[in-house]
Amino acid sequence: MVTIRGGGELLLVLLKKRPCAYCGTVSIPHTKGHVIPQALYPVSLPQARRITVPECTDCKALWEDAEPHFRNIMIAIWDPDQIVKDNRYLSMQRSLLQCDGPRRLQDFLDRLVSVDTHTGKRQMLYPAKDPWCNLILRRIVRSLCHFHGFGTAIADSRVRCDVMLWSVPEAFQPEFTWHEIAPGFFRYGYARVGDDCLHSFWLIRFSQHIEFFGAIEAAATRAIGEQLSPSMGAEAHRKR
């Protein structure tokens, strides 16, 4: 008979038995994977919800190096009127002083594009065209899909993310379910489609103005748990 002492140990035992949200494996050590990179949470939101999903160490390694880059890009465009000067900015500064800091700075500078505007030349960033940023965006969509019980181990190749440049037609707006982590921080919505072409459509918004869409293609073979209804998936997560 095994005695579990403390909630932390119980959580570790449960994590080991749950499939990785991204690949579905149960044979590789798991940890809690944060849907939104922790480095994006400002210190002013200590009570903001941290959504987590089970994540195996192999999958974590796929985007571990991309997360700091994603943070740097997002913080740079977080507020179009002024530089963000909170814990996130300080964390970015400290990271540039580490041994890999010069590489990360160069990666950031390489993404800057000079654009002519009516006020003169400006340096622009296009996160959806950045392979590392797009990798994190696709991961966020895949993890939210697992979190809401729409499917586990959704293949990365089925997900497309880009900047949202158009408004959802009014006729389709009632199809969306919305969730907000904190006003002005992170908000997302989804619509289940379930036809032969599209599994689901997602809108994810950072800050007040940075909005992306995520489209998950339908697949001939369902992902693990994809047959679950949204209510079943949410209830299962609450019980965990």
Image: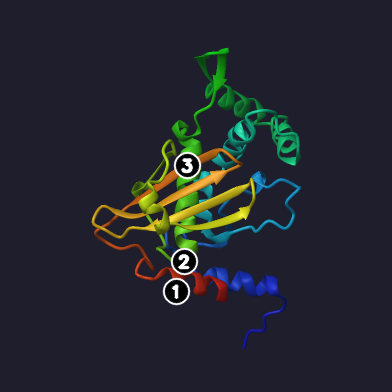
Q: Position of residue 108 (x, y in %)?
A: 58, 26
**Nearer to us in this view, 30 or 7:** 7
Quadrant containing the N terminus is bottom right
Contact (CB < 8 A) between labels 1 and 2? no
Front residue of 203/125: it is: 203
Res. 232 visible in picture: yes
- The residue wearing badge 2 is 19
Report the residue marked by disc 3. Answer: 212
Task: List the single residue furthest toward the front.
Answer: 170
Mark 2 or mark 3, which is nearer the start of the sequence?
A: 2
Q: Label 1 amino acid?
A: Met
| CA gap, disc 3 and disc 2 | 27 Å
Query: Could you say where residue 51 lies in the image, as x and y percent from the top left?
Result: 59, 59
Instruction: Give the x, y percent position of residue 144.
Output: 49, 57
> Label for residue 153?
none
Tell me the kind of residue under disc 3.
Phe
Q: Secondary structure at mark 3?
A: strand
Q: Is residue 169 above or below residue 227?
A: above
User: Local crowd at mark 1 within 10 Å, few (<14), some, or many (≥20)?
Assistant: some
Within 10 Å of disc 3 (Cα), the crowding (few <14, some 14-19, many 20+) is some
Above or below, comparing residue 122 to residue 169 in the picture? above
**Front position among marks 1 and 2:** 1
Q: Which residue is mark 1?
A: 232
Q: Picture quarter containing residue 42?
A: top right
Q: Residue at x 52, y 44 (%)?
A: 63
Compared across the picture, whether 74 is left or right of 93 comes to: left
Would you identify the image quadrant in which residue 80 lies?
top right
Residue at 41 percent across and 63 percent down: it is 150
How far apart are labels 1 and 3 at the CA level? Answer: 27 Å
Tags 1 and 3 touching, CB below 8 Å = no
- Lower position in the chain sequence, tag 1 or tag 2: 2
Residue that protrudes farthest toward the bottom in the picture: 1
